[in-house]
Image (spheres, helix red, strand yellow):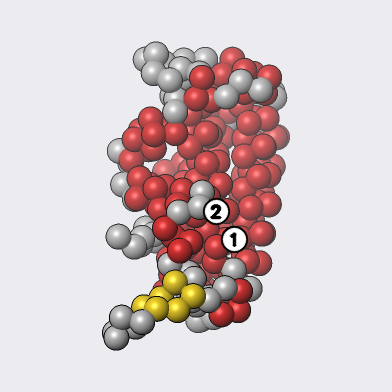
């Protein structure tokens, strides 16, 4: 595993610490709202996914790590929906009852399917559509999984390998995955900051937004 990957995983740890710090500040900022509960659920899920993702990356289990990146994007999509509805507390209350977010509507009457949420986010996060589509291919059995067991040489001969004989994933791809995970977590942090700003107007949101985080690079 390259030094770049380890350095990127350190950023993962720092983002987790920031999420924990933010969640504590949200909890202490006045009354408790339904959106607070949504925030805590997202942060908790994010932290658990992050721990699992880190272990799988270190163990070079890419086919297991990639779906966790997709689940982290799922955190971002569903949390961002809270900002699209007319009455956030009522929206969260419905989600807590078990209503699927895709069955709920935004303030303009649009049902919030994944594709709709991805499109809305892409206005400010241009890399989201490509990374979302790519990681979906690792959640469901697809051509992405075939590439890991099937290979062909210059002479047209092919081989199939599974387990320890499957095609190794280059470090550059692992690095892309970690950077994408970190970038997604960073966007979640921005939304948590936004909610904290709503609850406590003294928070300097502009200072947070000055932090620079790398944009993930995804393969075509």
* Neighbourhood count class around disc 2 (C-alpha, 10 Å): few under 14, some 14–19, many 20 upward: many
Name the spot of residue 203 as percent of width and height, x first.
Answer: 53, 38
Judge by depth and name the residue closer to the eye, 147 or 113.
Answer: 147
Q: Which residue is mark 1?
A: 64
Q: Residue at x 60, y 79 (%)?
A: 164
Q: Are marks 1 and 2 in contact (CB under 8 Å)?
A: yes
The residue drawn where x is 66% and y is 22% is: 98
Q: Percent position (x, y) of residue 94?
A: 62, 18
Compared to residue 89, the image places residue 23 above or below, namely: below
Residue 30: horizontal and vertical position, in percent? 67, 26
205 or 14: nearer the eye? 14
Quadrant hosting residue 75? top right
- Mark 1 closeness class: few <14, some 14–19, many ≥20 residues within 10 Å: some
- Give the Cα separation between the discs numbered 1 and 2: 6 Å
Foreground of the two, 150 or 213: 150
* Residue 26, above or below 88: below
- Residue 117 in the image: above or below residue 67: above
Residue 67 has which mark?
2
Judge from the rendering whether residue 136 lies leftward or rightward of residue 20; answer left or right. Answer: left
**Which secondary structure, mark 1?**
helix
Farthest residue in the front direction? 157
> Which residue is at 63% across, 66% downward?
56
Visible residue check, residue 209? no
């Amino acid at each position: 595993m390259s030094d770049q990957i380890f350095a990127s995983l350190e950023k993962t740890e720092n983002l987790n610490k920031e999420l924990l710090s933010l969640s504590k500040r949200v909890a202490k900022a006045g009354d408790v709202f339904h959106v607070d509960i949504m925030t805590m659920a997202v942060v908790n899920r994010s932290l658990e996914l992050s721990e699992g993702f880190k272990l799988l990356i270190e163990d070079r289990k890419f086919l297991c790590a990639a779906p966790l990146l997709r689940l982290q994007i799922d955190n971002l999509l569903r949390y961002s929906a809270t900002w699209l509805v007319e009455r956030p507390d009522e929206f969260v209350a419905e989600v807590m009852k078990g209503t699927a977010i895709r069955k709920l509507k935004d303030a303009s009457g649009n049902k919030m399917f994944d594709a709709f949420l991805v499109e809305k986010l892409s206005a400010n996060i241009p890399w989201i559509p490509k990374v979302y589509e790519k990681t979906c291919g690792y959640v469901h059995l697809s051509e992405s999984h075939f590439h890991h067991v099937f290979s062909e040489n210059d002479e047209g001969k092919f081989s199939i390998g599974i387990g320890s004989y499957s095609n190794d994933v280059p470090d550059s791809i692992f690095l892309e995955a970690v950077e994408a995970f970190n970038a997604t977590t960073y966007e979640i942090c921005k939304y948590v900051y936004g909610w904290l700003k709503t609850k406590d107007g003294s928070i300097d949101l502009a200072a947070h937004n000055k932090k620079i985080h790398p944009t993930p690079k995804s393969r075509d």
